[in-house]
Amino acid sequence: MGERGGRRVLEISIDPDLCIGSGDCTRVAPSAFGLDEDRGVSIVRPDAGHVEAALLLRAARGCPTQAIRVRLAEVEESGGDRRVDTSSPR
């Protein structure tokens, strides 16, 4: 919990300009990542925030182009948010 009673959620993103669609992330965390075969890049699945943080970080660290970002976002009750980087490789 944050100082003001907020909650923390994982925020996962993939930079499509860096991603080469190797699929390494889908092998490490298939419930968090998928492959957009039309664009040739990996995508974040809608429920990725519910996947164990250690798996997400392992996928991010194993990405050959470092296209995956995993961050901890603190969402305050007022609806605003404050983002704090975790140990994501980027």
Image (tube, rainbow, N blue to C red):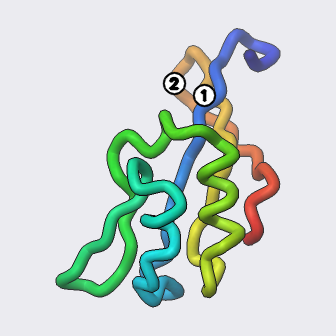
Looking at the rendered structure, which numbered label has been put on residue 17? Answer: none
Residue at numbered disc 1: 75
Looking at the rendering, which quadrant does residue 68 occupy?
A: bottom right
In this view of the protein, which residue sits in the foreground, 77 or 33?
Answer: 33
Residue at numbered disc 2: 79
**Above/below status of 46 relative to 39:** above
**Above/below status of 66 relative to 50:** below
- In the rendered image, the quadrant that contains the N terminus is top right
SS assignment at label 2: loop
Residue 53: give x, y in percent of width and height.
Answer: 65, 42
Residue 10: give x, y in percent of width and height.
Answer: 59, 40
Q: Residue type at mark 1?
A: Val
SS assignment at label 1: strand
Mark whose residue sits in front, 2 or 1: 1
| Residue at x-position 70% and y-position 10% | 5
In this view of the protein, which residue sits in the foreground, 65 or 16?
Answer: 65
User: Farthest residue toward the left?
Assistant: 38
Q: Residue type at mark 2?
A: Gly
